[in-house]
């Protein structure tokens, strides 16, 4: 899908050493709507936000063309080939802020270690230990970080559209590390790289046919999952078939619209029977039930386990080559058994390692480093 590029001269001068970083379009209608509602929710007031987003931002997979994804994968491979000393020069002297309003282990740590391994200075601001606790808005926190010299911000926030909002108010490149139930683009990219490597494919590039013939089953709490949404938007554009699986409470029919308006986005279906879905799967991605977003829901967990848990018996009935994935956090004994999570078909730890690799590339891209 063609994407227009937006470059903000001010942001460019402030943020980029090189040039030629592919940019982002200035925002889709749905994103603008989400950003508007986030601005209400987060700041309880209106913001005269610019409609532009700095080049190098990573807000949603929706904004990434297949060519952009190929550039990020090539950059990931290039950074991986460097030795540690060379890598530590890439962002030497640059400053990156990590702004986390929700708990996180893998995403926060991997962004931080990725930035540090490239030589950048990082600072972590979390809602528990900052003026956010005193009621400071996302906008004011972002402007403060910018005034202190942050050149890019990695944001995790419970409101959908918050990353877009922060990008607009600060003019800085913003990397969305998960915004509410909306998007988690770096997770989809690391999942993609894990799949390519485990399938024995070239992980340094992609095109619209790279995943032709591959069926990915995503099972569990899809309704609340930004990971499911980002993967379901990205992987069909590379040729994969995405099968969503779960009970109607966690997977409404409307989930079929996830890929709407995106090339290849029609390659999504719903299959309620997990065993039937697994029989066709090359890759299965299990998702945790997000209890913190389930207030008011009455889900029968015992029934969920019977119908949807990835157990050794289920795995034994599927293809011996089936690749097992999970973005974490894992709730052992609920959506997946410990034996399967630790078993030879599991790529769960590799996903975490690929998180470090991919996040180096998206941080370098955010700060204008070109391949
Ligand atoms: C997920 C998230 O926070 O979106 N985890 C992650 O980033 N690896 C999934 C979850 O919270 O269940």
Image (tube, helix red, strand yellow):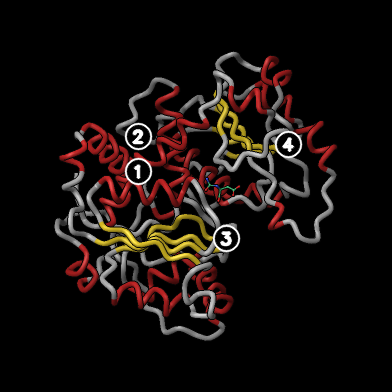
Task: List x then y, in percent, for residue 275.
Answer: 73, 25
**Which secondary structure, mark 1?**
helix
Work out whether mark 3 precedes mark 1 in sequence or the reverse, and give the earlier one. 1
Q: Are marks 4 and 2 in contact (CB under 8 Å)?
A: no
Dot 2 beta carbon under 8 Å from ligand 1: no
Cα–Cα span, label 4 and label 2: 34 Å
Work out whether mark 4 precedes mark 2 in sequence or the reverse, and give the earlier one. 2
Residue 69 badge: 1
In depth, the one of 150 and 313 nearer the eye is 150
Dot 1 beta carbon under 8 Å from ligand 1: no
Cα–Cα span, label 3 and label 1: 23 Å
Work out whether mark 1 precedes mark 2 in sequence or the reverse, and give the earlier one. 1
Work out whether mark 4 precedes mark 3 in sequence or the reverse, and give the earlier one. 3
Residue 269 visible at all: no
Choose top left, top right, bottom left or bottom right for residue 335: top right
Q: Are marks 4 and 1 in contact (CB under 8 Å)?
A: no
**Which secondary structure, mark 4?**
loop
Task: List x then y, in percent, for residue 268.
Answer: 60, 40
Work out whether mark 2 precedes mark 3 in sequence or the reverse, and give the earlier one. 3
Dot 3 beta carbon under 8 Å from ligand 1: no
Choose top left, top right, bottom left or bottom right for residue 207: top left
Q: Nearer the viewer, mark 3 or mark 1?
A: 3
Q: Which residue is mark 3?
A: 180
Number of other residues with Cα within 10 Å of mark 4, as a class: few under 14, some 14 to 19, many 20 or more:
many
Residue 334 badge: 4
Number of other residues with Cα within 10 Å of mark 1, as a class: few under 14, some 14 to 19, many 20 or more:
many
Cα–Cα span, label 4 and label 3: 23 Å
Q: Which residue is mark 2?
A: 206
Q: Is residue 111 left or right of residue 328?
A: left
In depth, the one of 22 and 322 nearer the eye is 322
**Which secondary structure, mark 2?**
loop
Q: Are marks 4 and 3 in contact (CB under 8 Å)?
A: no
């Amino acid at each position: 899908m063609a994407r227009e590029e937006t470059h903000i001269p001010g942001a460019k001068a402030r943020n980029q050493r090189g040039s030629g970083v592919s940019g982002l379009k200035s925002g889709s209608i749905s994103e603008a709507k989400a950003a508007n509602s986030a601005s209400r929710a987060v700041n309880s007031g209106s913001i005269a936000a610019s409609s532009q987003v700095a080049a190098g931002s990573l807000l949603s997979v929706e904004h990434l063309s297949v060519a952009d994804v190929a550039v990020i994968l090539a950059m990931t491979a290039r950074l991986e080939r460097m030795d540690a000393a060379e890598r530590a020069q890439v962002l030497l002297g640059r400053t990156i802020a990590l702004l986390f309003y929700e708990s996180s282990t893998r995403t926060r740590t991997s962004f931080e270690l990725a930035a540090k391994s490239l030589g950048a200075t990082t600072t972590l601001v979390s809602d528990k230990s900052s003026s956010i606790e005193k009621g400071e808005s996302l906008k004011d926190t972002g402007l403060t970080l910018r005034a202190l010299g942050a050149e890019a911000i990695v944001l995790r926030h419970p409101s959908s559209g918050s990353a877009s909002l922060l990008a607009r108010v600060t003019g800085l490149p913003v990397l969305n590390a998960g915004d509410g139930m909306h998007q988690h683009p770096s997770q989809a990219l690391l999942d993609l790289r894990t799949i390519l490597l485990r399938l024995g494919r070239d992980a340094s590039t992609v095109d619209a046919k790279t995943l032709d013939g591959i069926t990915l089953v995503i099972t569990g709490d899809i309704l609340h999952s930004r990971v499911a949404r980002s993967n379901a938007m990205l992987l069909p554009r590379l040729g994969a078939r995405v099968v969503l699986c779960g009970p109607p409470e966690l997977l409404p029919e409307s989930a079929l619209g996830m890929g709407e308006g995106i090339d290849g986005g029609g390659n999504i279906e719903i299959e309620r029977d997990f065993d039937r879905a697994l029989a066709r799967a090359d890759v299965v991605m299990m998702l945790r039930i997000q209890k913190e977003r389930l207030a008011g829901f009455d889900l029968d967990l015992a029934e969920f386990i019977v119908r949807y848990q990835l157990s050794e018996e289920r795995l034994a009935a599927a293809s011996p080559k089936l690749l097992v994935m999970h973005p974490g956090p894992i709730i052992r004994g609920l959506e997946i058994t410990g034996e399967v999570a630790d078993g030879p078909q599991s790529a769960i730890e590799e996903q975490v390692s690929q998180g470090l690799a991919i996040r180096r590339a998206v941080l370098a891209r955010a700060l204008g480093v070109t391949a």
